[in-house]
Image (spheres, rainbow, N blue to C red):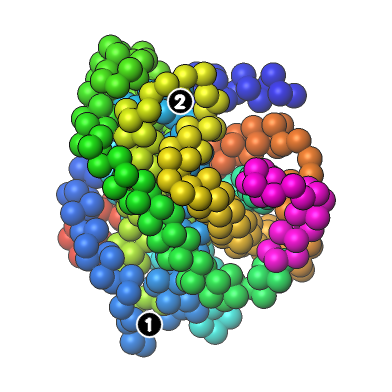
Amino acid sequence: MLKLIGAFQNSIGSLLLLILLFATHVYFTIRLKCIQSRIPEGIRLSFSKEEGSAGSLSPFAALATSLAATIGTGNIIGISAAIAIGGPGAVFWCWITGIFGIATCYAECFLSARYRVEKEKGVYVGGPMYVLERVLHKKKLALLFALLAAAASFGIGSSVQSHSICAAVTETIPVSVHLTGIIIALLAGSIILGGARQIAKVCTFLVPFMSLFYFGGCLFLLWANGGFVMQAVGVIVKSAFTSKSVAGGIAGTAVMIGIRTGLAKGLFTNEAGMGSIAISAAEAKTSSPVRQGLVSMTGVFWDTVVMCALTGITIVSSMLKMPQSYVGAGEDRFCFLAFSQIPYGEYILSVSLILFAFATIIGWSYYGECAAGYLFGEKGIGWYKTMYIVSVYLGAVLSLETVWNLAEMFNSLMAIPNLISLWLLRKVIIRETVCGKKRNMV
């Protein structure tokens, strides 16, 4: 099983998917006339309320829910692994995917808000599955997306994250993995069983808190490495285009390996093009799909352009300061080595990892719940929540190599039906965004 999954992950098909995703990012960036320039407007709108708009979540609550799912351990461990495998230049290519991915995130969230469905008075549902079925009349693709989303939620959303929490806890405290798993499952369950509004309420508090906590730790570390910060930025840019060794004893790596590693980590860390972020956009209080698209696309900005960049500069500046410490270190240890330079740094990093992983658990539960509701109706949601909470416990106590690879595969395949809907409806997205025409194009 592991060999088959590994073969898929390293196959030409996987590479083609990366190329298709990035091509979609570039296409919408050009056709939407560099919508990334409206990021300041999107940030402003995310904190403002629109009177008389329909929906059950505020724009910020919807954004926080999507950020909870996307800002995860990949922003820390994922960037650490990218640098270990692809060199410092991988961070540059990760930034590039984030910048271009903003346009695709706007496009998919625009469609979700544009074609959302009112489930009951004031409560809306949406996402690629509804767009595929109700607008494009592609029921099989809609079912495929929902199945893949639900399957991915059990892996990348619950099991993998609870395993990461367990690893972070046992890094500093000798405690039973079973006890840790039970506690995580109970805490997550108390939130998940409360429904979408409870999840959004917790995410609205948790996302800013955990981001600022980790952000503060990184800033303190950058201050400690002050003499190497600008040099680190230069090394990251230079390494993106050269395989030669760079300053501070950091060995170079093949440019193509750095590009592929950085693009892969960036594309799958921010989830732009996967269709998952669009699910939460449908429930936001808004009267305009353009407005909600602008708000939702800021999630990719915060996730990749800010958080991943911060992690990358922090690690590379530490590598320049004490290069010998990184010789022979595991790909998941780079971030711990960086934080070990400051007092209680490893505790700060462990707490950050725990918070990020827990936020992902509850954020992805919402995505999975929406997918289960689409597939099986209201009755299926209760069963899904029960299975999801159980998977949180199992993830903490079981070996997850197979589950991780499966989840990553499901997460990748989600992009295919979503990208089909984006390309088929690209004229609607472009016309209503650029020209401002609000009539029904389908």
Query: Relative to the observer, which residue lies in front, 231 or 239?
Result: 231
Seen in the picture, residue 81 relative to 133 is either above or below; the reply is: above
Callout 2: SS = helix
Residue at x-position 64% and y-position 32%: 405
Q: Residues in magenta? A: 167-188
Residue 394 coordinates in the image, percent (x, y): 79, 48
Q: In this view of the protein, can residue 224 be seen by the observer?
A: yes
Residue at x-position 30% and y-position 62%: 294
Seen in the picture, residue 164 relative to 186 is either above or below; the reply is: above
Asked whether, in this view, residue 257 is left or right of residue 26, the answer is right
Residue at x-position 37% and y-position 75%: 286
Amino acid type, callout 1: Ser
- Count of residue discs: 2
Res 314 quadrant in image: top left
Residue 247 coordinates in the image, percent (x, y): 26, 20
Residue 382 circle label: none
Q: Which residue is mark 1?
A: 53
Can you say which quadrant of the picture contains the C terminus? bottom left
Query: Main structural element of the magenta stretch: helix, strand or loop?
Result: helix
Q: Residue 84 in magenta?
A: no
Q: Residues within 10 Å of mark 1 (few under 14, many from 20)?
A: some
Q: Residue 182 in magenta?
A: yes
Q: Which residue is mark 2?
A: 325
Amino acid type, callout 2: Ser
